[in-house]
Amino acid sequence: MKITVNGRPKTLREGATLDDAVAGEEYREGSLVAVHLSVETVTKKTNDFEIVTPNGSMVLHLDDGPDAEKFRSIIGTVEGVTARWVTRKIVAFGSFSSDIKADPADRLYRKFDCFFSLGGGDNQTTYIMVAKNDHRESYGAGAGRIGRITVGRHLIEGLSEGEGISEIRPVMSEVSTENVDVTSDMSYPMEEGYSVDTNVLIKLDHRSPVAAEHILITASDMVLEVTDPTGSYIASSEDLDADIKPEKAAVRDTGSVTVRNEGAGKGRIYIYKDKRQVAQSHSSAGKVERGLAIVSMAKKGDRISVVTDPPRILSVGMTQKAGGEFLSKAGVKQVRKGDTSDGAVIVEQTPELTVEALKSGTVETFGVPRDRVYRIEITAEDKITSYYFRKVTGLSHKPIGALKVQFAFEGASMITFYGDEMRGKLLHPQPLFKKVKRGDIGITNQARPYCGLMGIRLQDSKEYGPTGEEPYGTNIVGRFADDLKRLLAEAEEDKTIYITEDKI
């Protein structure tokens, strides 16, 4: 069978499921997928049909009765018929044959009602009529009521005899529950003509570099979690501790993506289902180009696969050679700094923001020898403590972070690094340690002055932690998993030490 996946044609075996459709596509397991049904399937399900005439289109909303079902089954027969006669009461399109049984009883018809009639009581001359005003009459087919014209009613008065119905088609909206199923069930059966969106494609707004980068960082694993759904938008509050500044504000149209830049919820990402006015507290970050149905039907706790245009342009963690090749593919020129050898590891990129890198066309990549990037392990069960460490070091948004040495000298029992005192005030004391070992990494919590200070213990101790504090003032975050002697050989006050959780 032939379907479309993310705008591209794809051929599947008969009996294939959604699991087959998403294979090889940009998609994260457990996230929502939109399945746009085929015209044939929608015709069987929908109650709204567009009737195309020379003067424009009308929308017919079907009733739930048998005459409406009859209309679905003969749509192909009705296409091409003309307005056979027009009176002050009705417009009649036909004729065509049907199997409708004659019924001479009269009925009350309301303005814009749509119904069947039989010419002379003969179903070989069947008509579809639209009432132009309220009246009671017998049209030979009983009530024959199909539905009502809901859109394009002004066209009824302008129709003339001889003008025809050129096409009847189901009204197919990208977000209509009758046209699309949104699911994470990979056993969902595929049928010919289906169209599948495995992700939400967001075209980033280059007028808001910081807000755009926030989208790229938050969805770095290609997933956003819906934390705050409403009738007007869905929102993700995964990172409300971001350094967001006011940027371009614009009308929030359907599909607009914004980032709150001030106040409660600063850093929250919004994707809009309905139009809203300009708000200076919202920076325009992008626009949904595909997958709006996923947005429209997502609920709290749902996961959404996200793809951005452009993708993030960050070479940190790559070698100078690999970084240069990566940047070149993105259309950006590399200027090497620091250790410029091919095998050196890139630890800093300037500019780091994707939009600014594209605008500049050139980025500087600062490299260091591979053995100057030290491995650490974050083991803290307390999410606030581990979050603080990753946020302050930069590991929250790139594979290599940095620690700036505050205090280090030969023979000391610890080495300490600058932290963020304001963020450190949120570090609640954790269970007291009984003993810290050489290589343990800790943070001074809110129970002590200089909260947020970070350190590595160089000697085992039962009394003092990695920042020199007693147990009640220390939160253990993890361990230094590399060569401490090598670290100490280069550590000096105000020097930057590069760290990673990855193997490079």
Image (cartoon, rainbow, N blue to C red):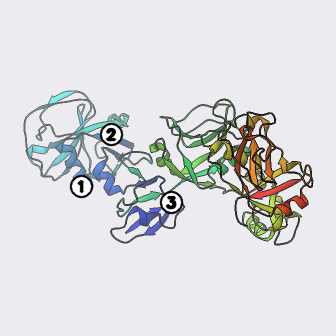
The Cα atoms of the two marked residues, 1 and 2, are separated by: 20 Å
Q: Amino acid at mark 1?
A: Thr
Q: Which of the 4 quarters of the picture holds residue 263?
A: top right
On the rendered structure, is 13 left or right of 487?
A: left
Give SS at disc 1: helix
Counting from the top left corner in percent of width and height, residue 114 is at: 24, 38
Callout 1 environment at 10 Å: few (<14), some (14 to 19), or many (20+)? some
**Mark 1, residue position:** 77
Q: Which mark identifies residue 159?
A: 2
The Cα atoms of the two marked residues, 3 and 2, are separated by: 41 Å
On the rendered structure, is 253 left or right of 389?
A: left
Give SS at disc 3: loop
Counting from the top left corner in percent of width and height, residue 217 is at: 67, 50
Q: Amino acid at mark 3?
A: Asn
Front residue of 401 and 272: 401
On the rendered structure, is 64 left or right of 465?
A: left
Q: Which of the 4 quarters of the picture holds residue 277?
A: top right
